[in-house]
Amino acid sequence: MAARDFESEIKQLQATMGTIEKVLDLGSMRAEIAALGEQVAAPDLWDDQANAQRVTGRLSALQGELERFTSLASRIEDVEALVQLGQEESDADSLAEAEAELDRVHKSVEQLEVRTLLSGEYDAREAIVSIRAGAGGVDAADFAEMLMRMYTRWAERNNYSVEVFDTSYAEEAGLKSATFAVHAPYAYGTLSVEAGTHRLVRISPFDNQGRRQTSFAAVEVVPVLEQTDEIDIPDEEIRVDVYRSGGPGGQSVNTTDSAVRLTHLPTGVVVSCQNEKSQLQNKASAMVVLKAKLLALKKAEEKAQLDELRGDVQASWGDQMRNYVLNPYQMVKDLRTEVESGNPQAVLDGEIDSFLEAGIRWRRGADSKSG
């Protein structure tokens, strides 16, 4: 077997890092970090809590991005030094260690390179994800709950915070729908490629004859608004309904009408929130979701743009973007990118990075062709 060309690989990685550095614009990033640091040091910062959270969140995100780049650049230098040492000393152990680390660095550089593709208007935002059961009855409701767990497990693996706004339970099992936020930089840009119809094929645990069942669930992803986004909703355009929160099987969560449903009358957009204890908190959370969805509508001038931003999906045959097959074989396959995994349980446990990265690259390619 031919010896590995360490020098060529390392030079290629350094060239890729140079490109990433230009895209990230580290000079501007450092300048913004310094400016935000001065704001954080101001004694009156927390007089305006919303602004303080925005400033501290932005600072933390930028510091994380900068550290990610500098630490990866340092790892490449370390590998280069280790290779040089191993070759000079004819040390097979050092070269073996360098080879293993080089493989890990390749993967990390690829992941960082994918981040530079997230340059859309809202890609840097946090995300609001909505999942709803489609065709397939109780299996579809169960599948919707499986997808919610998949995304929350992915968030946990990355130390991202998840805030659940609403869960509507189905009668027998699973979820009719759920809405939650993923609080992390670039969560929208990353998860927006998940929007669409997901299809599950398995032996139904709810069929007493053990037949194979196909079911569907729809995923919608919209960006969280920031203070600079102008979305004014006159009170007369919103209908507010209050009701009692409910849990699985219709079990009452509390005995007061704390759950809130908001209907935007001009567009017919409906959102609800029942996971807070007070009606006031639930209304505030529901407004966050409503404004995010209205932003998607406002910014989409044509139907094609709207479909891309929020996912115009029917959750049925013919428009699925990913298949999860548990029987007669084990396979998860993305129909857009052709990326697949033979371990559906791992995917459903949150190991979806390969699908996300391929989706982001696929979307960039599709954008380039349409442009």
Image (cartoon, helix red, strand yellow):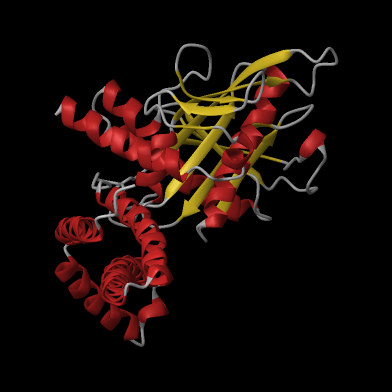
Quarter that holds the C terminus: top left
In the figure, 29 relative to 16: above or below? below
Q: Is residue 85 left or right of residue 17?
A: right
Residue at horizontal 53 percent and vertical 15 percent from the top: 316
Q: Is residue 352 left or right of residue 209?
A: left
Q: Picture quarter containing residue 56?
A: bottom left
In the figure, 91 relative to 270: above or below? below
Q: Along the line of sight, which residue is nearer the eye, 331 or 223? A: 331
In the rendered image, residue 294, in percent from the top left (x then y), is placed at 37, 37
The outermost residue toward the right is: 208
Q: Picture quarter containing residue 249?
A: top right
Residue at horizontal 31 percent and vertical 77 percent from the top: 89
Q: Along the line of sight, which residue is nearer the eye, 324 or 245? A: 324
Q: Along the line of sight, which residue is nearer the eye, 129 or 265? A: 129
Q: Along the line of sight, which residue is nearer the eye, 268 or 316? A: 316
Residue at horizontal 78 percent and vertical 24 percent from the top: 205
In the figure, 360 relative to 38: above or below? above
In the figure, 266 relative to 158: above or below? above
In the rendered image, residue 346, in percent from the top left (x then y), is placed at 60, 42
In the rendered image, residue 32, in percent from the top left (x then y), is placed at 21, 71
Residue at horizontal 57 percent and vertical 29 percent from the top: 132
Q: Please indicate, yes or no, whether residue 32 appears anywhere in the rendered image.
A: yes
In the rendered image, residue 60, in percent from the top left (x then y), is placed at 37, 70
Q: Is residue 145 left or right of residue 225?
A: right
